[in-house]
Amino acid sequence: MRATLRSKRALWVLPLVMAAGIFPTVLRVLAQNGSSEPAITVTPAQLDFGETPVDTAAAPQTLTFSNTGQEPLTIANVLLSGIDFSQTTTCGGSLPPGASCEVQITFKPVTTGPRLGTISFDARPGGLRIVPLNGTGK
């Protein structure tokens, strides 16, 4: 005998173990946890600014973080790394179900050559999303 649990993104097939106590416990855990998928999506998955003259700001690019889950997310941190990148954000302290917020990233290379950075979005529950940033100073 098999039971099927469907989520938005995955299909879980659970063999039903009819031994005493095991089946109700498994169903209770699945009901409490729902899908094990994170509730955060980010688009796009990376930003590439291409070639930009040194000390000149490229046009800003936007990242969108969305709460695709059923519960509100608490935003713990939005952190940027890389001296060639700066950010502005509409992301506050929480993100309700179905809501999105944006982070605009600007690239202004301080020297020539490949320049790398990341932006990290940390929410509870949901976890950490890290987006690579790159551009080239010319």
Image (spheres, rainbow, N blue to C red):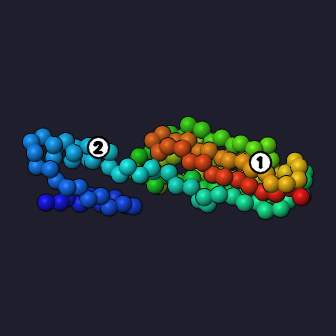
In depth, the one of 22 and 94 nearer the eye is 22
Q: Residue placed farthest to the top in the image? A: 76
Amino acid type of disc 1? Phe
- Location of the C terminus (image quadrant): bottom right
Amino acid type of disc 2? Gln
Residue, disc 2: 32
Question: Above or below — where is 125 with respect to 14?
Answer: above
Q: Mark 2: few, some, or many residues within 10 Å (few <14, many ≥20)?
A: few
Instruction: Give the spatial CA distance, label 1 vs label 2.
Output: 40 Å
In depth, the one of 17 and 82 nearer the eye is 17
How many marks overall? 2
**Reading the chain from its start, which is encountered first: label 1 or label 2?**
2
Circle 2 SS class: helix
Residue, disc 1: 85
Q: Mark 1: few, some, or many residues within 10 Å (few <14, many ≥20)?
A: many
* Residue 50 spot, x, y in % from top left: 79, 62
Check residue 128 in the rendering and tell me which mark sits there, or answer none.
none
Q: Is residue 35 left or right of residue 128?
A: left
Going 56% across and 55% down the picture, which residue do you hit? 42
Q: Residue 59, located in which quarter of the rendered image?
A: bottom right
Question: Above or below — where is 109 with respect to 25?
Answer: below
Going 79% across and 51% down the picture, which residue do you hit? 115
